[in-house]
Amino acid sequence: MDCIFCKIVDQQIPADIVLEDDQLIAFRDINPQAPTHLLIVPRRHIATLNDLDSDDSALISHLCLTAIRLAGELGIADSGYRLVWNCNAQGGQDVFHIHLHLFGGRNMHWPPG
C-alpha cells in the first residue's frame, strides 16, 4: 500500500507526533493552515468516511474525544478550535486515509479572511 499515513503509522516516514495509542496517532501537519494544525489518524487504514460502518462508531468517537483532549492540552480549548473531516476529492480530501484536522490558535470564522 502506498498510503503516506500508513507509512507514518508504521514509522517508515518521520512525523512530529504529539500523541499515539493503540487506535490512533496524532501529529503536526507539515503544511499548517493555522498556528495549531494537527492530524488525528486511525492506525487502521480506512480510505474515506464513506467506508465507515456502525462497527467504527467507537473508533470515530475516540478520534473526536482525542481531538478535544489535545485542544485542552495545547491551550486552545477555551479560545476555540475547529475540527474538520474531508471526504473524497471534491470534499477536499487529499490523502485517502481518513483523518481529523484540529485547527486553532487563530480566528476560525467562515469564510476565512
Image (spheres, rainbow, N blue to C red):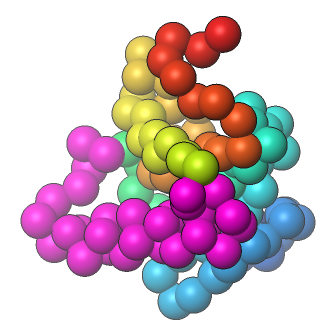
Q: Is residue 49 left or right of residue 82?
A: left
Q: In which quarter of the image is residue 88?
A: top left
Q: Residue at x 59, y 70 (%)?
A: 72
Instruction: Tell me the quarter of the image containing the C terminus.
Output: top right
Q: Is residue 25 above or below residue 64?
A: below
Magenta stretch: helix, strand or loop mostly: helix
- Say how many tags the image has: 0
Residue 87 x/y as whole percent: 38, 33
Residue 75 x/y as whole percent: 69, 64
Q: Residue at x 72, y 44 (%)?
A: 105
Q: Is residue 44 left or right of residue 58?
A: right
Q: In this view, does 101 lie above or below 77?
A: above
Q: Which of 65 and 26 is in front in this view?
A: 65
Q: Is residue 99 above or below residue 71?
A: above
Q: Is residue 82 left or right of residue 14?
A: left
Q: Hey, which residue is sitting farthest left in the picture?
A: 54
Q: Which residue is drawn at 81% across and 36% down?
A: 31
Instruction: Tell me the quarter of the image containing the N terminus.
Output: bottom right
Q: Which residue is drawn at 11% across and 65% down?
A: 54
Q: Nearer the viewer, residue 39 or 53?
A: 39
Residue 16 x/y as whole percent: 85, 65
- Specify whether residue 54 is painted magenta: yes
Report whether residue 48 is seen: yes
Q: Is residue 101 above or below residue 69?
A: above
Report whether residue 1 is seen: no
Q: Hey, which residue is sitting farthest bottom in the picture?
A: 22
- Specify whether residue 2 is painted magenta: no
For the record, the magenta segment spans 49-78
